[in-house]
Image: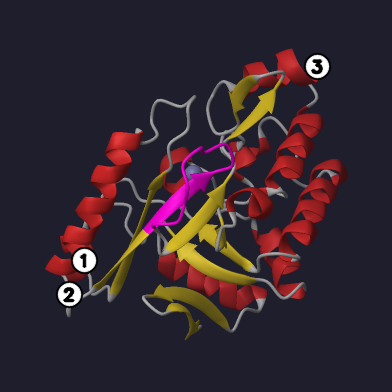
């Protein structure tokens, strides 16, 4: 991954593996977490003077390991916790969850997601808000719920407003476009407008799990951000965030 990024001219590359959770098999085990940190430190040394390697973590709202060893933290919500059971919002099982837990009401489910995600800063103390509307992951072409529905939008706006009180940096994430055939990035363009109006900042992320998706659609995203009215985006450096003119 680092070699591919370096060849493509990247000056910095951040790694943010999924933090350990007790209930999801794809997340890093505590042992794997230690190995991950060691691996990234080794890469840092290897690329010193050529490309900045940053050690980050994607901290799930239900992660149970601390975030102290990382240079940046992305805070993400992947599941709802209902009556002691976890229900993923970014898995196909969401179509079952809506039936069993929400009586088939997609807007009740999305509202529950946004309410939970609006607490992400308090829970994870993250630097960057991860895939803000990931609840759309399996909603390509609005097949299950209408993202223009006032119930959906007001829940999203409430969460956005609440989140912005504590963290201003939101990820513009193309992972769902690459993996899930979504026509829009996270957050959707109408949400980016709301974000800009409220003084939010954006940083690009491709949520890459492979080399091919590295920087996926970043040029398109920069054009989109310009059209929305952003005059800069943020990037991460070893000294923290820096602005990049759009
Ligand atoms: Zn995620």
The residue wearing badge 1 is: 44
Residue at the limit of the structure toward the left, as seen here:
46
The stretch in magenta equals 56-69
Query: Would residue 4 be visible to someone looking at this image?
Result: no
Position above or below: 24 against 217: above
Q: Is mark 3 on a helix, strand or loop?
A: loop
Label 1 to label 3, Cα distance in Å?
49 Å
| Marks 2 and 3, the one that precedes in the sequence | 2
Question: Helix or strand or loop: what does disc 1 sit on?
Answer: helix
- Give me the C-alpha separation between circle 2 and circle 3: 54 Å
Q: Which residue, given by chain and number where applicable, does mark 3 sit on?
A: 103
Does residue 77 sit above or below 38 in this rendering? Answer: above
In reply to whether residue 65 is colored magenta, the answer given is yes
Q: What residue does disc 2 label? A: 48
Q: In this view, does 147 lie to the left or right of 44?
A: right
Q: Nearer the viewer, residue 176 or 171?
A: 171
- Where is 95 relative to 163, above or below? above
x, y percent for residue 9: 23, 75
* Residue nearest the observer in this picture, 6 or 246: 6
Residues tagged 2 and 3 counted as in contact (Cβ below 8 A)? no
State which mark lies toward you, 2 or 3: 2
**Mark 1–mark 3 CB contact (< 8 Å):** no
Percent x, y of residue 193:
71, 68
On the image, which quarter does residue 225 sit in?
bottom right
Q: Decide which of tag 1 and tag 3 comes sooner along the chain.
A: 1
Question: Mark 1 and 2 residues: CB-CB less than 8 Å, in contact?
Answer: yes
Q: Which residue is drawn at 67% across and 38% down?
A: 142
Characterize the local packing of mark 3: few (<14), some (14-19) or many (20 or more) Cα atoms within 10 angstroms.
few
As drawn, is 173 to the left or to the right of 231?
left
99 vs 174, left or right, is right
Locate the N terminus by quadrant.
bottom left
Q: Which residue is drawn at 17% across and 80% down?
A: 49
């Amino acid at each position: 991954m680092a070699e591919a990024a370096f060849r493509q001219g990247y000056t910095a590359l951040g790694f943010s593996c999924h933090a350990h959770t007790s209930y999801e098999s794809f997340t890093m085990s505590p042992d794997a977490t230690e190995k991950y940190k060691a691996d990234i430190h080794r890469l840092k040394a290897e690329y010193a003077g050529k490309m900045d390697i940053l050690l980050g973590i994607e901290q799930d709202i239900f992660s149970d390991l601390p975030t102290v060893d990382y240079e940046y933290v992305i805070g993400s919500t992947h599941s709802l916790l209902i009556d002691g059971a976890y229900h993923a919002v970014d898995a196909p099982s969401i179509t079952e969850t809506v039936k069993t837990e929400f009586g088939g009401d997609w807007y009740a489910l999305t509202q529950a997601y946004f309410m939970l995600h609006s607490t992400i800063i308090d829970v994870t103390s993250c630097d960057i808000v991860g895939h803000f509307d990931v609840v759309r992951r399996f909603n390509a072409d609005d097949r299950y719920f209408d993202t223009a529905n006032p119930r959906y939008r007001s829940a999203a706006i409430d969460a956005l407003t609440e989140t912005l009180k504590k963290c201003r940096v939101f990820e513009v994430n193309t992972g769902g476009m690459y993996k899930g055939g979504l026509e829009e990035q996270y957050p959707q363009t109408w949400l980016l407008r709301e974000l800009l109006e409220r003084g939010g900042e954006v940083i690009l992320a491709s949520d890459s799990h492979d080399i091919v998706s590295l920087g996926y659609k970043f040029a398109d995203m920069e054009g989109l951000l310009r059209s929305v009215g952003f005059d800069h985006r943020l990037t991460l450096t070893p000294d923290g965030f820096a602005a990049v003119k759009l």
